[in-house]
Amino acid sequence: MEISILENLQTLNEDVMRELLGDDIDEIKSFRQQFLVQAKGSLQKIAGHYRQDNLKEIKEEAHYLKTSAKAIGAERCAYYLQALEDAALDLEKQKCRAYIESLSIEIKNVFRACNN
Amino acid sequence: MKLDITKTPAVLISQNLAILDLNDAALSLFNKQPDALRATPIDQYIKFSKEISNNLSDQWLNHTVAAMVSNKQVNIAFLPQEQNTYLLMILDQPACTAATPQNYVTGSWMYNISEKAFQLSNTCAALLALDQKTAVPIERILNSFREIDRALVLNAFKEADLDKKPFCLEVHTDHSLDSSAMQFICQGLQDESTPDILKGILKRNVYSQVLNCKLYEQNERRRRALEGGRIGTWSAAKSSQSLYFRWDDQTCKLLHLPLKENHGDLASWLAQIHPQDVQSVKDAIEHSFNTNLDFEREYRCILQNGESIYLYAKGVLSCDSASGTTFLDGVIIDHTSIYEARTKLEESNLLLEAKVKSRTAELNQAVKHAEMASQSKSEFLSMMSHELRTPMNAIIGALDLLTHQDNSFEEQELLDTAAIAANNLVSILNDILDINKIEAGKLELDCYDFDVSKMLNNIIVIFGPIAEQKGVKLKVVEAKDMPSELNGDENRIRQVMFNLVSNAIKFSVNDSKDNGLVSIELSCTKVNSLVSKLVIVVKDDGIGIDEDTLKKLFTPFTQADKSTTRRFGGTGLGLAICGRLVELMGGGIVVNSELNVGSEFAVNIPIWNFKTRQKALLYPCINIYSNEHHSDHIEQLLDKLSFYCDNVTQQPIGHLSTKASGSHCLDILIVRSMTDIHELDTKPVITQKVLILYQQDILSQVKERFKSAFKLDIDTLTFFTLEKYLTQLKEQTSIAPETLQEDDFIVDLDTNLEPNNTTSHELPLLIVEDNEFNQKLMVKQLSRLGYNCELASDGIQGLKMWQSGDYALVLTDCHMPGMDGFELTKHIRKLEDKDKKQAIPIIAVTGAAMKGDQEYCLSVGMSDFISKPVTLAKFKNALERWYGN
Amino acid sequence: MTRKEVEHVERHPKVVLLCDDVEELAGVTDVISSQITAFRTLNNFSDMHEVIVDSTPLVIIIAMSTVSKSVELYSRLAKEGALDYPHENILLCENRESGIGFRCCMKNIFRDYFIYKPMYENYRLRMILHNALLRSKEAHDITNIREEHFGRIDEDLKQLIDDAAEYHQSAEQTLKDARENLQQAAGINEVQTALIQDLKAQHIDPLLDKLESQLADSVSELTKRLKNKQFSVAELSALLTEKSIPHTSQHAVQLKESKPEPKREAPSKNEGFLDLPPINDNNMARSEQRLKNSKIMVVEDNEIYREMISKILRDEGHEVESVGSGLTAIKMLRKHKYDLIFMDLFMPELDGYNTTKNIRNIPNCKSIPIIALTSNKNKDLIRKWASLGLAAYIAKPSTKQSILKAVEKCNLAH
């Protein structure tokens, strides 16, 4: 999966899960739900770390959530998470802020996509 | 000296004529043994001419009677004796009509006038107590007579020398012990042809002679006894004013005097006495005579050879009213050896006494020392503990601060180690303080209602990881009828359990096996209608305790083995404290142990007030999914669940439906093995409400499989945890996963909830603390939490700063030189009162986490307290509560 | 929950502890055995000789009652020819002999020393042991990598690595000999000896050190380059795998639309997979049969992804054990035997690289195939990781096909 060009990415690439799990809708729903729960917690943690200038922790948390995002096919989410990871590693606080905000919006999109 | 009379056979008979005694001559006459003769009637051996009757009349007494003895014709004289006994003298001669009655003993003598010497018959010599029988000079004969008779006899002979005429004299002998007289008869010349020779007889009444004989024998015996006992006799006679003393041979021997010197006046009697004792003896003798009281004295005598002896003298006073003479008859006894022994005894007594005294003094000293040492030990220990706790608290605080930094894994490991070590040290110090408090009787119980299941859970939470680390399995059995709350000193009961469980874990590591098992059993049984008892049993399967150690297990500083201290660490105070605490609570500890098998500590504590557990129905139904149907686990679970649900069913794991049932029922899943997990793996992901009860050894698997599910260790299940989880699960229903909102994903990047970088804490805190290190530490901790601080190093300075500055809050140490925290608080409160100012929050930082101290803090007007060691979390908690309020 | 085996009688130990009093060293043995299980304690000379000759342990730890005895023992073993192979030696001594220990190490008699009485820092001992193992294994690993994981890599490359390793060793030996000779070089009189010592300390030793380090650097540079080459082969294979994914996945989708059960056929359509022998139906059935029995471990901290992979593998009939951390994985691997491991690179506490390193120390796990799961582009890290032996490399989240391919590849390779 190429996650370098945002335009090519989907909010929720349903194929990814299908590739992995086949047609088990319940299963897929369950994983998406898990992701959202995870995302909620992670996002708050990231925000907390940001407020405390704890960029290293942001990177760790973002990396963790990125794996999940990729797994369920939240490609744009994964993109922002990767970007956030890089920005945090470079200690670019302003960039981090922008990415966290984008991430927040994007997760809302995923939430909507999941509930459709 | 045998008297002739003894050669005459004599028999003593009783009134009824039975033989009582007889002499040798009689024995040979009867030719029988004395035993055969005694008590037999006399007429069996003697045939009297007249019939003898029991009542011997005058015609028998003092007369001779003819009789036959052993076919021999004899005459027998009957002599009445004292106590109605009679002496029978068997006389060889046939009775004759001679003028001389046969009841006389007669000796004959011849006197050569020219030679002035006597020729004596045997009897005569005996009567005169002389050995010599021929050519006995007259002086010697005279000596046998009493002094007063001698002149008489001498005169009689002088006359007879000239006129050769017979004479008859009544004489007394000195040696004769009775006063009866003898007849000294001169019959004139032997014959006309020999004009120089006078002949005569000496006659004595036989009865007198026999008496004399007996008396003599008695005298002899007494003399021998006195001689053997080194007892001398003496007597003093007082007529008119003069005293005349006489004493016997034994006295002479005692006093080393020549035998002749056996009489004298008072002076000669006193001559030998030690000059220092003379006066007292003299006084005592005079006193006796004057008062008619007996004389008794102990005194010293100096012998001629210079030796000194100790004498005991005693005399009995008697009066002869006829002559008007008073006699003091007495004995003297050589008491030297007794006296010496007594002296020695006294000396040794004195010595002993002195020794005892000095020993007692030493002992007292030692006791005093020991008491002082014990006191100072206690003082030292508690002082040291206090002294050590202050820096230890600082160290713990510092370590806590460090752990809040970004540390590498290894750094963190080191910090953790240091923190554990420091905490252990503090708990050891607390132990020491505790034991001192208990020993000094200063520990008081603080009883209140508490949740015993919660306390149990507390212990499991703390020891669970420790046990796991050591490879020890923890198992909890909580009786189903355990009260929900009971009244007691929770902290102390917990302390006892802490100690027991920590020991059990420590020692359950048995060399012979890999896994230890420690079980904690809690139950509550009724003793009578008023009292119940809480029973806590802690079992391990460890190294066990031998019997000797078992006995002293509860004395301080004892561990099962010296080597165990090395191996397992610890102060050895834990069990001592447990024992004392349980005692204090009125309970007891019973220990059972077998070497290499394990130990069991059973504590029972009387409980007066408790609340029985009430049903609190949380679910309409609960389904248990377990591949195990009947086991202790299930039984206990069902017991516990019965309080929360009336409808509990049981099914194998295979029946678990993973789809949310939608009902309000709860599913409980019991996962005990990898097989269970694999079975679950084949099922879709669980989405419904479920409580998982797992076996500790597959925890990591369960954790990874069911990350978000509620799960509990089935072995350490308590009412407390079960209820908590069941309640949580029930509430969770409303926060079902699908209720995620879009808003949940909104982030707030600006509002800083953390006090870290904020400027909101503008008003500074005032820290009053004397220890410099602690000052630094607290400033660091507080600035980390985003607070500004100002420092005062004692109460006085603190008070000044409070008066002149504006602070949001005061943090003060309690014990400081000068003005302590309590004083400071009182001052501040008083001033605030006076000025009608709002009270500033004052938080005490107390060293001792004792209930009493904390109450005292509040009683003097402090707002709150934090116990040392102060961690960031504690500061944060307290400051959030009080800062700005 | 079970405690570690503390039976130090490994038949072919990698680490041996030579001592005269086993009791005294209980603490040390515990520490060592917690680090490495292939470890044995010996206190009898003939046993020592036999075990060393038999199993040529990588690390020899000597802890006789005194340092002089330890030196004596070591030289005796050396004289008897038991030590004629590359190994690391560590001296354990008591605190009071720390000075002597230090000097022994300075004279290169021992590589390192550790104060075991009293033992202040068991981590230090573990560090020393770890480093020693690492150093001595460097040479061995070069061979291991070749043997176990790069069997199909060009023979020349292998040879080069071997040469490098040998060169490194012999150079090291030469240097060591040179040092020893120097050490033994004595002057005619004391003054001269002292002069020589000074000279050595000030000039020769630093020179030698520099030489050694340069040599080491250049060798490691050489080795690194060689390994890079090796890696690039592995990377190539991974890249190829990745490249093949869109193709196969699309194909799979198409297949899914037309057929209800497309899974079985999907892999057979794949021609692009590296080094995979042509798969026919027979082959497939056989391998399926075999794969059913595979016991696979998934090590991944992200539970969603972990569950997904586990589910995919389970659905294929494999027995899957999934764990969330490297530490748990190591624990489980010590107890149970697995056929294959999927492992994430970035994990808290212990990352994939370090987990693998530990796994390779577990007996029976030396050659267990490990498939790396990572989206990480950090080539250096993966390169490093590959040096420990990786069977394949999968980019997250990947697809069912690529995951199953990797499994197949491993199974066929074995």
Image (cartoon, helix red, strand yellow):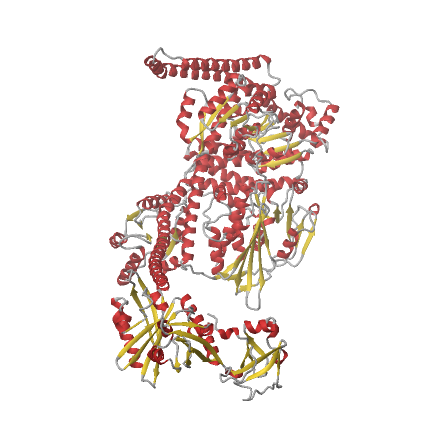
Question: Closest to the observer: B209 or C330?
Answer: B209
Question: Closest to the observer: B546 or C100?
Answer: B546
| Farthest residue, direction bottom | B58
**Image coordinates for residue B666, horizontal then vertical, percent:** 63, 52
Question: Closest to the observer: B8 or C127?
Answer: B8
| Farthest residue, direction right | C282
Question: Closest to the observer: B35 or B495?
Answer: B35
Tell me: residue B422, above or below residue C291: below
Left of B4 or right of it: where is B337?
Answer: left
Residue A116 in view here: no
Tell me: residue B280, above or below residue B565: below
Q: Quadrant of residue C160?
A: top right
Residue B386 in view here: yes
**Image coordinates for residue C146, horizontal then vertical, percent:** 58, 18
The C terminus of chain B sits in image quarter: bottom left
Tell me: residue C71, above or below residue C346: above
Left of B650 or right of it: where is B862?
Answer: left
